[in-house]
């Protein structure tokens, strides 16, 4: 080695070691990112399914066409519970019940890029319709934290009823609906003024809320075994229906010409129940056996496939809505709770 | 021994020492230094620690600091940022981690009044209230939150970003901006910094 080459070698070793020390030598995630340029253009993402695994503290990433796992993302937190995906599919937000933190995940690079404390037992996260804010319901704080997505700063908090567990926005984004387990209520919040304009009594242990394709808010009373439907013009409950023990979540899909129908995971039956969405003629159309303790459910954009997270059997079932049959099962992490899919 | 090998071994030792220090310890992020009356520090497991007079109570992430009526206190973060708590004040020590920026210290003011002077050249410290967040960078502020959630941010020195759900304001020295649930930050109004921070003066002696 020449004298110049020797000096270069010394400089290289020193720079490498110093860089490793500064980036945290015990953190392979950071080391890997340190050597991958940030400005490399990545190929567009194919359709994906993301599954929050509460007891694995991570998110499974599945190619929703090939139905193969393409990655697992460490949420860098504890008890990963709920998920919300940005409209462009580039950011995934994950609540972590045990740590009260929100993980922000870069879906192109499959890594957690931020972790933000929102409140004790952060349960669900929902993005505002303009995707500028994430609202996070904190069960043990009786608050909703408001996160500014551009800066990842908490910019406010709203008091709620006791134990907020579900959160959904109306189609026009003017109203937020918050279910409160402790109060057995759903609060209607006028988003522009951040004020509660109505409080609706519901059943025992109200939990999941979702905006339906009919523009109404659909919710589950996990403790009283029924689902309910809220009209977003009158903010009144227009229907409720007994479905069975421990209904968890709802998604909407078509069966040929019929639909959209509501698909409800009923954990106590190990089934998905299919209901008509006509509030005047709500009835069970069919029952689909799935894995152990189904919880999360999500339909693909076409409304032909449903992805069901079974928290007892640690897998997801893929249902073909046309035949009402499970056509595939994919293993995921421990205790999968929530599933979302890119558009 | 070759110079390259010496440098390599020295840096390796440094890295091992660094890794060892961060592996199994609860990272101290500051110290409570003084209390007129009593400062109560509630740990995440519910255990309470108290400071009366001068002392050095170690502070950790997720600790809740409380003063009751007639008590005031001061603490210092590891980066040198000084914080004073007026009476009837409660805050929690939090953080945000970002891959791009590392750890940002966050103080969530649940009730009462704080005085904060950030350390020169340190990373910004953020003070959250229910109606907005003050981003304090090379500045001195007073922040008071009322029972209804209205926050009054008064800047003594420097200028501070006040982030709310409705937009951001830049609050300049010797002015006050207020934020409330359901509205953004108000226009800056002139204030008297000496008067506003008078309550904190005897904490800094």
Image (cartoon, coloured by chain):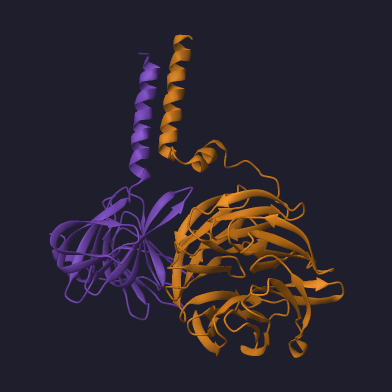
Chain colours: A orange, B purple
Which residue corresponds to the image point at 27% horizontal and 54% vertical from the top-left? Answer: B30
User: Looking at the picture, does residue A164 appear above or below residue A278?
Assistant: above
Left-right relation of B44 to A339: left
User: Looking at the picture, does residue B2 appear above or below residue A166?
Assistant: above
Position in image of residue A85 (x %, y %): 62, 61
Which residue corresponds to the image point at 65% horizontal and 80% vertical from the top-left? Answer: A217
Left-right relation of A26 to A205: left
In the picture, the quarter occupied by the C terminus of chain A is: bottom right
In terms of image quadrants, where is residue A289? bottom right
Position in image of residue A188 (x %, y %): 55, 83
Name of the residue lying farthest toward the right: A257
In terms of image quadrants, where is residue B60? bottom left
Left-right relation of B140 to A307: left
Front residue (pair A257, B30): A257
User: Looking at the picture, does residue A9 appear above or below residue A207?
Assistant: above
Position in image of residue A170 (x %, y %): 63, 78
Residue A19 in sight here: yes
In terms of image quadrants, where is residue B66? bottom left
Front residue (pair A155, A204): A204
Left-right relation of A2 to B41: right
Front residue (pair B143, A204): A204
Q: What count of labels does the image hold?
A: 0
């Amino acid at each position: 080695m020449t004298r110049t080459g020797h000096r270069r070698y010394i400089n290289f070793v020193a720079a490498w070691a110093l860089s490793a020390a500064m980036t945290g030598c015990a953190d392979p995630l950071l080391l890997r990112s340190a050597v991958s340029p940030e400005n490399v253009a990545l190929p567009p993402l194919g359709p994906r399914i993301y599954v929050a695994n509460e007891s694995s503290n991570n998110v499974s990433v599945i190619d929703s066409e090939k139905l193969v796992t393409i990655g697992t993302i460490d949420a860098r937190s504890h008890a990963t519970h709920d998920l919300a995906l940005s409209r462009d599919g580039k950011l995934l937000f994950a609540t972590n019940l045990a740590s009260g933190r929100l993980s922000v995940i870069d879906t192109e690079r499959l890594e957690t890029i931020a972790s933000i404390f929102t409140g004790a037992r952060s349960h669900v996260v929902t993005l505002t319709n303009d995707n500028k804010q994430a609202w996070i319901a904190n069960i043990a704080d009786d608050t909703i934290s408001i996160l500014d997505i551009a800066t990842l700063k908490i910019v406010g908090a709203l008091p709620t009823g006791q134990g907020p567990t579900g959160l959904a926005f109306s189609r026009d984004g003017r109203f937020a609906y918050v279910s409160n387990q402790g109060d057995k209520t759903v609060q209607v919040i006028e988003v522009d003024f951040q004020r509660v304009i109505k409080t609706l009594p519901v059943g025992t242990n109200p939990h999941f809320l979702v905006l339906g394709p009919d523009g109404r808010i659909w919710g589950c009373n996990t403790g009283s075994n029924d689902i309910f439907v809220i009209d977003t013009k009158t903010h009144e409950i227009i229907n409720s229906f007994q479905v069975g023990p421990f209904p968890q979540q709802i998604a909407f899909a078509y069966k040929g010409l019929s639909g959209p129908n509501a698909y409800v995971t009923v954990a106590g039956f190990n089934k998905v129940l299919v209901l008509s969405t006509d509030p005047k003629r709500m009835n069970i159309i069919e029952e689909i056996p799935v894995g152990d303790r189904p919880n999360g459910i999500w339909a693909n954009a076409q409304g032909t496939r449903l992805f069901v997270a079974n928290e007892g059997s640690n897998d997801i079932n893929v249902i073909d809505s046309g035949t009402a049959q499970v056509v595939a099962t994919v293993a995921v992490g421990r205790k999968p709770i929530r599933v979302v899919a890119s558009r | 021994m070759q110079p390259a090998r010496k440098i390599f071994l020295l840096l390796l030792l440094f890295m091992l020492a660094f890794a060892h220090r961060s592996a199994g310890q609860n990272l101290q992020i500051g110290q409570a230094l003084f209390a007129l009356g009593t400062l109560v520090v509630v740990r995440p497991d519910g255990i309470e620690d108290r400071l009366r007079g001068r002392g050095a109570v170690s502070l950790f992430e997720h600790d809740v600091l409380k003063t009751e009526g007639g008590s005031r206190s001061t603490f210092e973060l590891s980066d040198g940022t000084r914080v004073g708590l007026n009476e009837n004040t409660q805050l929690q020590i939090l953080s945000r981690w970002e891959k791009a920026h590392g750890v940002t210290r966050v103080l969530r003011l649940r009730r009462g009044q704080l005085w904060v002077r950030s350390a020169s050249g340190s990373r910004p410290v953020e003070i959250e209230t229910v109606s907005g967040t003050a981003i304090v960078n090379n500045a001195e502020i007073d922040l008071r939150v009322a029972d209804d959630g209205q926050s009054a941010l008064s800047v003594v020195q420097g200028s501070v970003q006040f982030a709310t759900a409705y937009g951001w304001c830049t609050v300049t020295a010797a002015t006050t901006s207020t934020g409330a649930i359901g509205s953004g930050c108000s226009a800056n109004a002139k204030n008297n910094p000496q008067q506003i921070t008078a309550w904190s003066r005897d904490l800094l002696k």
